[in-house]
Amino acid sequence: MSTANRGINIGPPRFKIAVHAIVWLAQSGCVLSSAMIANQVDSHATFMRRVMQALAMAGIVASKGGREGGYILRKAADQITLGQIYCAVNLATEPEVEGGCGEAGVQLDLELEKILYEAERQTIDYLQQFTIADVMKRVEFFTQ
């Protein structure tokens, strides 16, 4: 089985979709509607609007209303990291430590949450090393 078909599924599906959307916006350099982006990244327009709203709230994209509305990048592709995108679309909150947990199952869940939270923090730190421009350089399609 080739690695292209294998599909690594680390992180939320929103993350991959968001990266694809940001790449398309960077390539186009203009305002694109959520329907246009959804079509390009093979997603549903409603789901795409939710993803784009999260990216807008994080300051990665700007939204323009109206008939000619849509989304455009607020920053250059070399200024947007994968870590920023990941945080915009999915960031777990630090687990709350509850006192007096008597049940072993509750304590186990709490400890697992702590471990998973730290794994996510390390993932974000790693993703901060890569920009959208870096990703675009790695993909042959965009260098032609």
Image (tube, grey):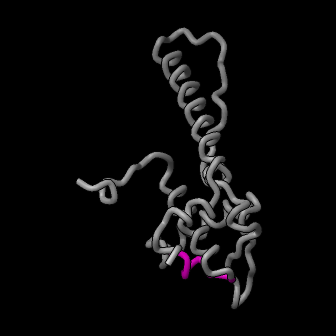
Magenta stretch, residue numbers = 30-38
- Residue at screen point 49% across, 78% down: 144
Furthest toward the bottom, the residue is 67
- Residue at screen point 34% across, 59% down: 4
- Residue at screen point 70% across, 84% down: 69
Q: Please say whether residue 130 is one of the residues in the magenta stretch.
A: no
Q: Is residue 109 above or below residue 81?
A: above
Q: Please say whether residue 32 is one of the residues in the magenta stretch.
A: yes
Which of 25/141 is in front? Answer: 141
- Residue at screen point 55% across, 82% down: 36
Expressed as whole percent of the image width and height from the top left, the position of residue 136 reads 56, 66
Expressed as whole percent of the image width and height from the top left, the position of residue 57 reads 74, 60
Q: Is residue 54 above or below residue 83?
A: below
In the image, taking residue 120 as reference, residue 67 lies left or right, namely right
Which of 73/93 is in front? Answer: 73
Which of 68/82 is in front? Answer: 82
Which of 19/92 is in front? Answer: 19
